[in-house]
Amino acid sequence: MLPFSEDWYLTWAPNIHTSMFANVYAFLETYSDGLDRVDLLTRAYGLYAEHFQMQGELLQMDLTRAWTFIRFRDAGILRLAGCTRCRGKFVAHAHEPSHSMVCGICRPPSRAGKTKAAAKAALERSVALAQAA
Ligand SMILES: [Zn+2]
């Protein structure tokens, strides 16, 4: 997979993160008059980062990845498609049929969340909880 392949956005954790960013971006695009593309990008990215950092999650996307996603979306390569189970909107290939799409949260892969980074983040969360108690 190339560093900036559109397929990166379809892998499990990056897809969940990108979908959160993309939904925020689409909301701001629809309801915020007068924001240019740079404002939309930085505000949507800031809200995305804030959300995941509050949950103690490692960020999957940097600002460059976020910008690249917008370029793929505007070029008609990627889009938001609705999950048939939870009705959430998730990043998908633009030309893939979406009538049977199930998102990565409703159907996580068997190895989901079992990376070294996820184990380290879980350990840090439990240490923080133990210190807070
Ligand atoms: Zn779902």
Image (spheres, rainbow, N blue to C red):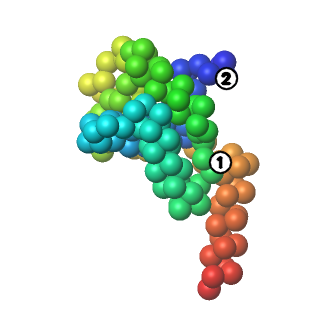
Image spot of residue 42 (x, y percent):
50, 41
Q: Nearer the viewer, mark 1 or mark 2?
A: 2
The secondary structure type at the circle numbered 2 is: loop
Image spot of residue 25 (x, y percent):
39, 38
The extreme front residue here reads 34
Mark 1 / mark 2, whichever is N-terminal: 2
The residue pinned by badge 1 equals: 114
Image spot of residue 76 (x, y percent):
39, 15
Q: Amino acid at mark 2?
A: Pro
The residue pinned by badge 2 equals: 3
The secondary structure type at the circle numbered 1 is: loop
Quarter location, residue 130: bottom right
Residue drawn at (26%, 25%) of the image? 99
- Is 6 located above or below residue 48 in the figure? above
Quarter location, residue 43: top left
Q: Nearer the viewer, residue 100 or 22?
A: 22
Q: Amino acid at mark 1?
A: Lys
Q: Quadrant of the N terminus?
A: top right
Residue drawn at (53%, 20%) of the image? 6
Image spot of residue 88 (x, y percent):
32, 42
Residue drawn at (68%, 81%) of the image? 131
The extreme bottom residue here reads 133
